[in-house]
Image (tube, rainbow, N blue to C red):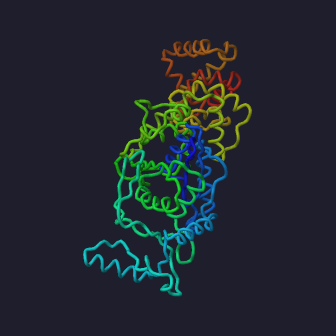
């Protein structure tokens, strides 16, 4: 095996990119990227009835949004069917596989009899050691000639040594009667041909590893390093499903979680590095290893995701955050930002970042930048703009005409107006916020005034008081 690892992510294109699949891809990506290795992508599209180009595109888009770049072109498993069949024929010629002519009815009868007699219902083909001259002119499958004695040990980097007695392993089908290869054969051939050194996948594939090992041994190929990771469960400890909320990566993108926050959170789902919760990509690549992966299923927790997401937004470079906001708006088919909106957005970002959990939350805070005059205030904001408040705000306008446009000067002007009416500053700030943003939740009124400038501030107050 080469010193630098080669890992792969091999999803089936039968739907969206599942959040569990995304974490598997992330673990493979981190392991390879942290060791100057290669991370490959294989689309396991052999199920022609369920595989769709749209699902493949969704997987590629999901990985791209997450920032999980792969090396080379994605490989189609279906396109390699001839190569898989060639290996089955080689195994047949070498005596590691055999032609089985048993019909489905005969197999069912064998299993029924075995159950009735209390024997193992693992099918034992009568054709395993049959002489070729006894073969009928009839359809057949090609089966692996699995060892009947001894044991198979998976030396797993997460689960430890896992042992199977060989008499519990079946002579699995390698080629169907129509000559098409099975998934179990295709996976091994593809991993070998792609040079995969480390197979990192869900622990629901652990039993498959014991059966796939037989193909590696039969062909004399290097066995990869196995690492079977626990699945993700919901907060209730049950396997993650639709009842727990979002399952597809695109749903998290639509909710406005930044990709950096998702990477950080998914890395922490089942893997840890001491007590570290928040970390960068470079730290994750340097730290990630099998020793940090637990054996128990991880539990998905939206509160922790929100917390990490907020931390990443807080430290994100302003230009990168503006780009995230633009990408989010584009995904919602919103009109692109104008140059003036971009300028104001950038100016407001240092204040808007604070306490923001998602890009969607950031866009809501930026409503005062993104919406056009005259604002249609929401219900709560409209409630703070009663007749009294509007009269007081109207008095503010001439003071703002000549005020120095600094935070201290603006606070002083609004403070003096509040004092003249025996009011606390907040009693004026709320209707002022409604006038400037049309919302009751926004950055501070003084931050907004500094961002949009004197002319726009006065125009919005006049809209609300006219």
Left or right: 415, with 149 as reference point: right
Image coordinates for residue 273, horizontal then vertical, percent: 43, 33
Q: Quadrant of residue 11?
A: bottom right
Q: Nearer the viewer, residue 329 or 450?
A: 329
- Residue 303 visible in the current orientation: no
Q: Nearer the viewer, residue 425 or 263?
A: 263
Q: Quadrant of residue 323?
A: top right
Q: From the viewer's perspective, is residue 10 above or below residue 444?
A: below
Q: Nearer the viewer, residue 409 or 342?
A: 342
Q: Nearer the viewer, residue 358 or 37?
A: 37
Q: Residue at x 34, y 48 (%)?
A: 236
Image coordinates for residue 454, horizontal then vertical, percent: 69, 21
Left or right: 114, with 186 as reference point: left
Image coordinates for residue 443, horizontal then vertical, percent: 56, 27
Image coordinates for residue 81, horizontal then vertical, percent: 61, 67
Q: Quadrant of residue 282?
A: top right
Count of marks placed on residues: 0
Q: From the viewer's perspective, is residue 48 above or below residue 396?
A: below
- Residue 402 visible in the current orientation: yes
Query: Where the C terminus falls, by quadrant?
Result: top right
Left or right: 163, with 2 as reference point: left
Q: Residue at x 38, y 65 (%)?
A: 169
């Amino acid at each position: 095996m080469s010193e630098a690892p080669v890992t792969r992510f091999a999803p089936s294109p039968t739907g969206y990119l599942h959040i569990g699949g995304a974490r598997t891809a992330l673990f493979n990506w981190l392991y390879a990227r942290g060791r100057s290795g290669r991370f490959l992508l294989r689309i396991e599209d052999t199920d022609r009835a369920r595989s769709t180009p749209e699902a493949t595109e969704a997987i590629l888009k999901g990985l791209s949004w997450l920032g999980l770049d792969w090396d080379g072109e994605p490989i189609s498993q279906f396109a390699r069917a001839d190569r898989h069949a060639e290996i089955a024929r080689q195994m047949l010629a070498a005596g590691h596989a055999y032609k089985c002519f048993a019909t489905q009815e005969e197999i069912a009868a064998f299993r029924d009899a075995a159950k009735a007699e209390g024997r193992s219902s693992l099918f034992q083909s009568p054709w395993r050691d049959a002489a070729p001259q006894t073969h009928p002119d009839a359809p057949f499958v090609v089966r692996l000639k699995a060892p009947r004695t001894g044991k198979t040990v998976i030396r797993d980097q997460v689960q430890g040594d896992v042992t199977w007695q060989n008499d519990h392993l079946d002579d699995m089908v390698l080629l169907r009667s129509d000559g098409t290869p099975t998934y179990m054969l295709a996976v091994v051939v593809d991993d070998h041909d792609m040079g995969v050194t480390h197979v990192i996948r869900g622990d629901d594939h652990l039993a498959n590893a014991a059966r796939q090992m037989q193909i590696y041994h039969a062909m004399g190929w290097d066995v990869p390093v196995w690492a079977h990771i626990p699945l993700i469960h919901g907060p209730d400890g049950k396997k993650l499903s639709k009842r727990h909320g979002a399952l597809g990566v695109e749903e998290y993108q639509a909710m406005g979680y930044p990709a950096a926050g998702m990477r950080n959170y998914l890395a922490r789902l089942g893997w840890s590095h001491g007590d570290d919760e928040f970390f960068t990509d470079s730290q994750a690549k340097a730290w990630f290893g099998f020793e940090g992966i637990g054996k128990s299923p991880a539990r998905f927790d939206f509160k922790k995701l929100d917390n990490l997401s907020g931390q990443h937004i807080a430290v994100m470079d302003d230009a990168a955050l503006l780009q995230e906001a633009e990408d989010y708006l584009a995904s919602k088919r919103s009109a692109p930002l104008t140059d003036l909106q971009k300028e104001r957005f950038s100016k407001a970002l240092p204040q808007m970042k604070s306490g923001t959990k998602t890009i969607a939350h950031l866009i809501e805070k930026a409503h005062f930048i993104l919406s056009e005059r005259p604002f249609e205030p929401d219900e709560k904001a409209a409630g703070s703009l009663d007749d009294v408040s509007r009269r007081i705000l109207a008095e503010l306008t001439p003071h703002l005409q000549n005020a120095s446009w600094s935070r201290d000067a603006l606070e002083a002007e609004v403070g003096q107006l509040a004092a003249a009416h025996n009011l606390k500053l907040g009693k004026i700030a709320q209707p002022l916020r409604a006038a400037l943003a049309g919302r009751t939740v926004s950055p501070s009124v003084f931050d907004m005034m500094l961002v949009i400038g004197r002319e726009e501030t006065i125009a919005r107050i006049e809209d609300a008081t006219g």
